[in-house]
Structures are given as structure tokens and as C-alpha cells.
Amino acid sequence: MTHETAHLPLFPLGTVLFPDGLLPLRVFEARYMDMTARCLREHSSFGVCLIAAGQEVGEAALPHPVGTEAVIEQWDMGEPGVLSIVVRGRRRFRIEDHAVERDGLLTATVRWLDEPQSAAVPAAQADILPLLGAIAGEAGNPLPEPHRFGDAAWVGARYAELLPIPQRARQALLELDDVVSRLEIIQQYLRQHGLLGRKG
């Protein structure tokens, strides 16, 4: 377990960002416009956390303790006062302590979480791969490049983003350190909903 910490501005949202995932955001509140401008200027990152209590707009929301570092990959200001950005998830973190700045921006001391070593999708879960491959082939629902269908962590994260499950269930999948356990949960879900063949 690593003990390396960092100080990050936080963007509490009603959704969960996974490592290597892409998330489009519309930024219009002054605190987040300033944060985004600073990140672009300094080539720095911010943290995305699922809201545990509160709202995205207005007073600082209470975040879930585990989130994902976000880096801005694209930005555009197509309309006045609204910044459209696309962020990519990087490392997961756990909030050690947080504070609300004078402008309402939430900042936190975070501890980076150890990520599992790259591991292949076990043979027992290989039956979930064709469906993800089919999704990747659909023009309207592309998965973030590069595709790593042989990587258990990548496959589990992409399914966790796509499945129509409550955000708190998505958060629980984010917090799992065991990537094979995540695949087993996803496989069970797909079977229960008739998206995979039954066992045996």
C-alpha cells in the first residue's frame, strides 16, 4: 500500500469516473471555470468523486471518499460562459482530509491507491469479452482508445461504466481492489439479465 499523498481540487459529480475512462463535462460555475483554467495553464489535474450528499451546483457537496484523478484531454468554449471539456481518468485515490475554499471549491489531501498489476482476463470470465467487443464496434458507442481487451482491469472498468446500474453500485465497483472480483460481479449481472449464456 502506497502512502504517497497529493493536494487536489475536487469536482463532485453525480457520476463515477474510472481509470482510463473518458467523461465529457460542461463547466459553467465560476469556481470550476477557475479550476479548469488553472489545470489547463499548469497541465495539472483534479479529482472526480461521486456525490454522497448534496448537489453538483451550489454549496460544496459531500464526496464519496474514493475518486479518480482527471486530466483534461479536450476543451472548447462553443457558447459564452460554458466550457466543454473531456477528461480521462488516471489514478484512484482516497480522500484523507478536505476543505472548502472561499470560492466554494472543494480541495482535498488524497492518498493514491495502489493499482493492481496488469493481469489477463481469466478463462472463467472470458465469455464476457465478445459482448464488449461488439459494443466497441458500434459507431455510436465507442470505448476509449486504446482498447485493451486482454487486461482484466480495463475490461472491468469499461463494463462498470456501461452497465445500467445505480451510481452507488458503480462506486462500489470503483472501490474494489480485486479486478477479478469485479469481473465476477459483472459476469453474474450479465447472466442474470440474459446477456450471456447460462453456466453449464
Image (cartoon, rainbow, N blue to C red):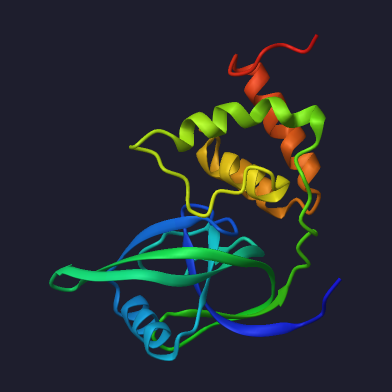
Residue under the image location 78 percent in, 67 percent down: 114
> In the rendered view, would you say 189 is above or below 114?
above
Query: Residue 148, percent across and down?
Result: 61, 48
Q: Quadrant of residue 183?
A: top right
Identify the residue shown where x is 30% and y is 73%.
Answer: 29
Q: Is residue 184 left or right of residue 85?
A: right
In the rendered image, the vertical position of residue 117 relative to residue 36, given as above or below: above
The answer to whether residue 146 is visible is yes
Residue 105, how many percent across, how many down? 44, 80
Q: Is residue 154 left or right of residue 143?
A: right
Q: Tell me the quarter of the image containing the C terminus.
A: top right
Seen from the viewer's position, the closer of residues 112 and 121 is 121
| Residue in front for this viewpoint, 138 or 112 | 138
127 on left or right of 28:
right
Where residue 88 appears, as percent x and y from the top left, is 49, 64
Q: Is residue 61 above or below residue 107?
A: above
Q: Looking at the picture, how far across and down is residue 116, in whole percent?
A: 79, 59
What residue sits 77% from the left and 13% below the top?
Answer: 199
Q: Quadrant of residue 103?
A: bottom left
- How many numbered marks does the figure carry? 0
Q: Which residue sits at x=43%, y=34%?
A: 137
Q: Farthest right residue?
A: 1
Q: Is residue 59 visible?
A: no
Quarter-wise, where is residue 78 in the image? Answer: bottom left
In the rendered view of the protein, which quadrant contains the N terminus? bottom right
